[in-house]
Amino acid sequence: MPFKQHSGRIYRITRLLVFHFVFILTAGPRQSSAAADVFMFPPQNGYTGEYISNLAFTVGQSIDIKWKSGCDESIQFWLMKDFNGGDCQFQRDALCSQIADTPNNGSVAWNVSFMGLAGPGVYYIFNLDDGPQYHNLYPGVNEAEQSSRPYNLDIDITCTRDRDDKVNDTIQIIKATVPVLTEHGTTITTVFYKNMLTAHPELNNVFNTAHQVSGHQARALAGALFAYASNIDNLGALGPAVELICHKHASLYIKPDDYKIVGKFLLEAMGQVLGDALTPEILDAWATAYWQLADLMIGREAQLYEQAEGWTEFRDFVIAQKVPESSEITSFYLKPVNGKPLPAFRPGQYISVQIHVPELNYLQARQYSLSDMPRSDYYRISVKKEPGLNPAEPGAKAHPGYVSNILHEFKNEGDTIKVSHPYGDFFLSDAKAANPVVLISAGVGLTPMTSILNTLTSEAPERKVSFIHGARNSQARAFKNHITSLEQKLPNLKSTFFTSHPTEQDKEGDDYQYRGRVDLSKLEGSQDLFLDDATTEYYVCGPDTFMTDMLNVLKSKGVSEDRVKLELFGTGGVPH
């Protein structure tokens, strides 16, 4: 999978493995002031519905709910916000807060006010039927005319009866294959990749070579198949992960035909390894399960491509400047060859960079966070060089920093590289809001944080911001002088630097405030973390264990998990 030099949202381990399933299969991360994006998730235990992934409501805002036709009196309509990644819509437990529970009024509109719940997140609309029938919702969401309320959405719902015995049979068959995947999963996925890449060598331009050589993708996919089969009856939990993956797919320009190739070779690999044990019924069930997920992703990716307004393939950019930021991080200023103004992005998002690798004789793409605020004339990425890795040496292509080091060693000012439209579901929610922001990062994880910081200091210089960063020493730390200069100009910005291995030249109190790794317990709660303000947003960026530690400490200090935003930093795993 592509290595993205920035960090991630936390899912449970089984949800992570499903993430690997859908991402690795096809090459490899939502809020808006415009109309909402709405996606269907399959019927689960009597529930069916949609998730709305790009709404950011505040207290007092409202929506209008209207039924079109076909809904009987047994329907209840819920609108809920999910804080833990997908389970709560079936449990109505403490991890999920219910915003509205409406009775059925035929075609009469029902106005729902957002009384106590607000902020960006994943919102679910779905129905419950305690009787024998199952109902699917097919709403179309359109932004209503402007009113005195910031949001006024019409959600039209048509109810149909649509669950038959085949759905239940498919679920049971898939779950029954769990022991088989435990025993043969890695063999299946190894055969899958070998056969597919032999028949379609052009896909080497999409897949991450380092993960192919190391066997990481085959092992991760095997675990993902196991997790997918184990959780096939709870696919609603996939919502947030699917959004994350579809953004990555869009940055790689994955197309529907790619899903056809992957599905074909995955099912054939199952047959090759399992032989007669793969009965026609099992094969059909897995084909159904695969396309259920693939169709969902194809639809979402089509929406993302449409939003890119014609930027539907990699474009040529020239490296206008190559600027060292530290002993190991260098910034690349990228300008479009066509000279046209660049579309804005959300601070925290990333681009895919694609380069030709002569040693491999095909293309490789990696994701890099944009490290400056949106500008119309250039994008900036800041890339870490892996010490001791020579891209020309045999075996280097198995290293996750392979492409990054090629950029450092062989790409110079004036060279042309391929760049995608910006994507990613980790970004600053609202640059002009008034609530405090805490930015916490480690290592090269500061790159999206610098984009967020530059945006905040430009668009809302009076906003309270705490920038907390950890690095080995001041020589390895990027942007320190820039951040310090901003702090001197802006009284509401405070920076705190941790240094784990200071050099003789590093002076405590000047080059850094604390020795060691980032430790939030050393900071003052109200001044450094704004713990006395329940609206504070926290953005965390760094390796998985770092993010886990930061999240746990913040939760122990009373910060609700929905106010902590994380983004996947590497590809070897996420915290859980």
Image (cartoon, rainbow, N blue to C red):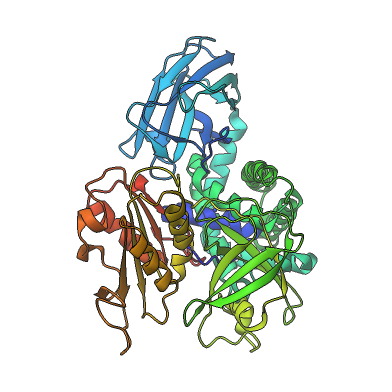
**Can you tell which quarter of the image residue 149 is in?**
top left
**From what the image shows, is residue 443 above or below residue 59?**
below
Q: Is residue 22 left or right of residue 12?
A: right
Q: Is residue 354 left or right of residue 387?
A: right
Tag count: 0
Residue 440 spot, x, y in % from top left = 36, 61
Which residue lies at the image location 52% right of the left edge and 46% below the top edge?
A: 175
The foreground one among 434 and 171 is 434
Position of the N terminus, as image quadrant, is bottom right
**From what the image shows, is residue 402 above or below residue 270?**
below
Position of the C terminus, as image quadrant, is bottom left
**From what the image shows, is residue 362 above or below residue 100?**
below
Is any part of residue 226 visible from this angle? no
**Can you tell which quarter of the image residue 319 is in?**
bottom right
Which residue lies at the image location 57% right of the left edge and 21% below the top edge?
A: 145
Kindly give the residue lying farthest to the front in the view shown: 489
Which residue lies at the image location 44% right of the left edge and 66% below the top edge?
A: 446
Is any part of residue 216 visible from this angle? yes
Q: Is residue 54 left or right of residue 85?
A: right
**From what the image shows, is residue 19 above or below residue 362?**
above
Residue 386 spot, x, y in % from top left = 52, 81
Residue 544 spot, x, y in % from top left = 41, 64
The foreground one among 496 and 486 is 486
Which residue lies at the image location 34% right of the left edge and 26% below the top edge?
A: 115
**Can you tell which quarter of the image residue 479 is in?**
bottom left
Residue 282 spot, x, y in % from top left = 64, 47
